[in-house]
Image: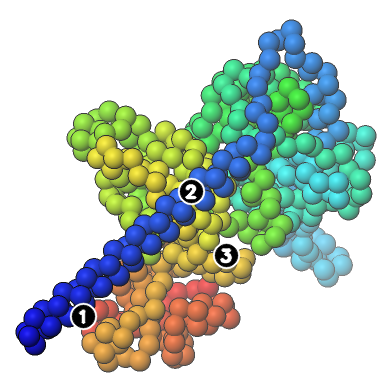
């Protein structure tokens, strides 16, 4: 009887455990499904916030209305540069007669020009970074011939955008469109100041979208340039840079940035930065002082016919995952090498350029839905974006600048590593790119234990210590094999 009761209790306990396990996994699966549906609804709502910008037949388009709405919101940007810093010279005749033959010559000055678009009534203006980069003085002239001094609020070389501010009220700001809904063949106007000819309007059509023409260099610390231009045949010339590309309703759909030409002047095609990228950059520069970009943490390449055949991919286009990075959002969410990304936030992406454009709208900490093709199976994977350093938090401008100098993924070491190396604390370099650390000779997996004899407690402490430094810095630490090393570099 005791044995029967024992069997019964064991069976009953096993049943309870099975039920609990099934309930746990069902709840986890339901949570995942609920998260996916929430993100799909969020993406659908975001995509429907704007009316589609449909092109109209030539005889139906009223270019005059669109131009009239736009010209007053586009300004002429004038810049002044120092061509040299001035230098000391010696005049022996002046020295003989007056005793002051050593004198400093004034620096030689240069000038540049471009265009800008008024984004708010209180005087915020967006232009290209290359228009104002390195300028010692920036002025804007409005369409009613008012000249105002401008302050550079922020710059983003990776998207070739900059934000200016003038002291003025009730300025004629432009209406924003939605560049995702722009269609090839749609009529557009380019408004700017080519060759210093103010308030010039040209017309054309959208020739292509998602163009990468390799004119923007990656940042010095390896930050990828964001190139996903709207290509048009509206005439754009030097001086148009930073001007407006608008649809037939006079809504901003892009900032004119470049031409493809062997002569330096317009020969058929021009390129504009999509307004959805522009809006995000402007918001970040205003709110955080620096652009906050969300990253998947993957190494990628376009799906080609050859790659699809070699890797036996069940997709003819998309973005192939060549590798996932430690501490990256993709690896954490379960995306694997060999997966093909086909959608970002419910937007189809056929290549790397389109994927970068969609990701550029999000910040670290944002939840998005990534659709992948894994061996023919379509999977929707929710994930939380991180920055390029593996963190989900938004980064203050000063810390972001330090991160960019170091260009490394940092993580606190675990208790097992502490015990094995007989150290109390330290920060491991999980990944390392071109930056101060690599230039000093530091390799991946190095564990930083001291900075200028200050014992490093954790990652946040390391960043705090380095932020307070200027000039030479001495780093002390150890590799996983126990080999100690010392490195020096300048901040």
Question: Where residue 19 sits: x, y (%)?
Answer: 27, 67
Question: Where residue 96 sits: x, y (%)?
Answer: 81, 66
- Picture quarter containing residue 119? top right
Of badges 2 and 1, the one in the foreground is 2
Q: Report the front residue among 101 and 351.
A: 351
Secondary structure category for the residue under label 2: helix
Q: Report the front residue among 345 and 185.
A: 345
Q: Which residue is mark 1?
A: 481
For marks 1 and 3 on the same chain, the one whose residue lies earlier in the sequence? 3
Q: Report the front residue among 183 and 47.
A: 47
The count of marks equals 3
Question: Where residue 266 sits: x, y (%)?
Answer: 63, 22
For marks 2 and 3 on the same chain, the one whose residue lies earlier in the sequence? 2
Secondary structure category for the residue under label 3: loop
Residue at coordinates 82% horizontally, 62% vertically from top-left? 94
Q: Which residue is mark 3?
A: 394
Residue at coordinates 77% horizontally, 27% vertically from top-left? 250
Secondary structure category for the residue under label 1: loop
Residue at coordinates 88% horizontally, 53% vertically from top-left? 167
Scheme of image coloration: rainbow
Label 2 to label 1, Cα distance in Å? Answer: 47 Å
Q: Is residue 394 visible?
A: yes
Residue at coordinates 65% horizontally, 22% vertically from top-left? 54
Q: Which residue is mark 2?
A: 37
């Amino acid at each position: 009887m005791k044995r029967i009761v024992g069997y019964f209790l064991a069976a009953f306990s096993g049943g309870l455990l099975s039920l609990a396990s099934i309930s746990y996994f069902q709840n986890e699966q339901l949570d995942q499904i609920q998260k996916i549906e929430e993100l799909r609804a969020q993406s659908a709502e975001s995509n429907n916030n704007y009316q589609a910008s449909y092109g109209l037949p030539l005889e139906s388009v009223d270019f005059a209305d669109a131009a009239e709405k736009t010209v007053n919101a586009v300004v002429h940007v004038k810049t002044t540069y120092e061509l040299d810093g001035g230098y000391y010279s010696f005049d022996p005749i002046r020295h003989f007669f007056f005793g002051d033959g050593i004198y400093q010559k004034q620096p030689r000055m240069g000038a540049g020009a471009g265009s800008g678009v008024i984004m708010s009534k209180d005087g915020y203006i967006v232009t290209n970074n290359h228009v104002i980069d390195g300028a010692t003085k920036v002025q804007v002239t409005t369409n009613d011939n008012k000249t105002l001094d401008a302050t550079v609020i922020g710059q983003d070389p990776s998207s070739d955008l900059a934000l200016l501010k003038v002291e003025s009220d009730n300025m004629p700001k432009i209406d924003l469109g939605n560049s995702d809904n722009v269609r090839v063949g749609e009529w557009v106007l380019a408004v700017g100041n080519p060759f210093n000819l103010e308030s010039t309007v040209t017309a054309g059509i959208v020739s292509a979208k998602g163009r990468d023409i390799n004119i923007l260099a990656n940042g010095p610390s390896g930050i990828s340039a964001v190139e996903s231009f709207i290509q048009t045949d509206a005439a754009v010339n030097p001086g148009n840079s930073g001007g407006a590309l608008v649809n037939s309703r006079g809504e901003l759909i892009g900032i004119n940035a470049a031409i493809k030409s062997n002569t330096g002047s317009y020969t058929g095609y021009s390129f504009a930065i999509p307004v959805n990228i522009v809006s995000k950059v402007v918001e970040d520069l205003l709110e955080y002082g620096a652009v906050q970009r969300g990253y998947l943490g993957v190494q990628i390449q376009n799906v080609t016919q050859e790659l699809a055949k070699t890797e036996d991919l069940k997709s003819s286009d998309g973005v192939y995952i060549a590798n996932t990075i430690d501490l990256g959002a993709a690896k954490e969410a379960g995306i694997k090498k060999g997966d093909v990304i086909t959608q970002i936030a419910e937007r189809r992406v056929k290549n790397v350029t389109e994927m970068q454009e969609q990701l550029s709208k999000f910040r670290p900490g944002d939840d998005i839905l990534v659709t992948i093709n894994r061996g023919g199976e379509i999977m929707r994977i929710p994930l939380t974006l991180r920055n390029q350093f593996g963190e989900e938090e938004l980064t203050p401008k000063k810390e972001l600048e330090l991160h960019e100098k170091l260009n490394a993924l940092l993580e606190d070491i675990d208790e097992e590593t502490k015990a094995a190396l007989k150290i109390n604390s330290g920060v491991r370099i999980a990944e390392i790119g071109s930056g101060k650390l690599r230039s000093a000779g530091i390799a991946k997996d190095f564990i930083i234990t001291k900075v200028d004899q200050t014992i490093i407690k954790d990652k946040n402490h390391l960043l705090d210590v380095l932020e307070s430094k200027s000039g030479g810095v001495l780093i002390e630490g150890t590799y996983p094999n126990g080999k100690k090393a010392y490195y020096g570099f300048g901040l």
